[in-house]
Structures are given as C-alpha cells and as structure tokens.
Image (cartoon, rainbow, N blue to C red):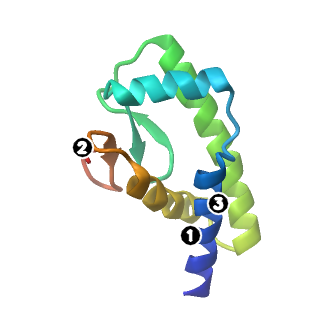
Amino acid sequence: MLRLVAILAAGLALVAGGAFAQTAAAKATVDAAKAQGVVGEQGDGYLGLVSGAADPAVRAAVAEINAGRAQAYKAIAARTGVSQAAAGQATAQQLFARLPPGAYYQPLGGSWARK
C-alpha cells in the first residue's frame, strides 16, 4: 500500500509539475490535437491516437512526449521499486482525473471514451 502511495505521489508530481520532457512546440501541438479529439490519454500513461490517423507533426509530437514520459516512468520506477509499466499506469489514473470534459481517454484493455 505504501508503495502505491509513493507511485501515485510521484506521478502526481510529474503531472502537476509538467516534468515530462517535451518542447513547447510539441506540447502545443498535442494540446491542439487533444482539443480536436485526435489524441487522448491511455491507461498505460502514454498518449495515443484516438482514430489512428494524424498528420506527421502530431505523430512526431506524440512520440516526443511519450519518450519523455518513458524516461519519467523509468525514474519513478527506480525511486519506488516498481516496474516502469506500473509507474505509467499509476500516473495515467492521475491524468484521467485531470482531463477536461470532452477529452478522450482509453483505460487499459478498454476502448476510447470521452470524459
């Protein structure tokens, strides 16, 4: 239980502090794509393409942000003693809770849904 609390706290710090490695341009591109319903948050803690189709700039921005998230989840895993996947999943729960109405998310093993 304490380990889960540590993971959630670390994930929340990443979400609140914007600690994912990303450029301002990638963030702006992804934010716009999220607003259009092209990109959403996945249950593994990574971004995904809602329809599978997106222009190359959106795909590149998603890849950049996901690479930064992978590094962050690796660091959380090292600090808390859990797997990188568990760190991503715990962070996803925090991300889901902070999504604005109308945003897309995909729980693990589920389909895309709108908040």
Disc 1 is placed on an element classified as: helix
> In this figure, which residue is indicated by the disc labeled 2?
114
The first of marks 3 and 1 along the sequence is 1
Q: Name which residue lies at 26% across and 39% down.
A: 102
Residue 54 is left or right of residue 74, and the answer is left
In this orientation, does residue 88 appear? yes
Gap in Å between the C-alphas at discs 2 and 3?
A: 25 Å
Residue 42 is left or right of residue 2, and the answer is left
Please name the amino acid that badge 1 sits on.
Leu
Please name the amino acid that badge 2 sits on.
Arg
Which of 81/102 is in front?
102
> In this figure, which residue is indicated by the disc labeled 3?
13
Disc 2 is placed on an element classified as: strand
Neighbour tally class for label 3: few under 14, some 14-19, many 20 plus, Cα within 10 Å: some
Residue 41 is left or right of residue 88, and the answer is left
Where residue 65 appears, as percent x and y from the top left, is: 60, 34
> In this figure, which residue is indicated by the disc labeled 1?
8
Disc 3 is placed on an element classified as: helix
Please name the amino acid that badge 3 sits on.
Ala
In this orientation, does residue 43 appear? no
Question: Which quadrant, please, contains the N terminus?
Answer: bottom right
Q: Are marks 2 and 1 in contact (CB under 8 Å)?
A: no
Q: Name which residue lies at 24% across and 43% down.
A: 114
Q: Residue furthest bottom?
A: 1
Gap in Å between the C-alphas at discs 2 and 1?
A: 23 Å
Where residue 8 appears, as percent x and y from the top left, is: 56, 69
Where residue 108 appears, as percent x and y from the top left, is: 35, 56
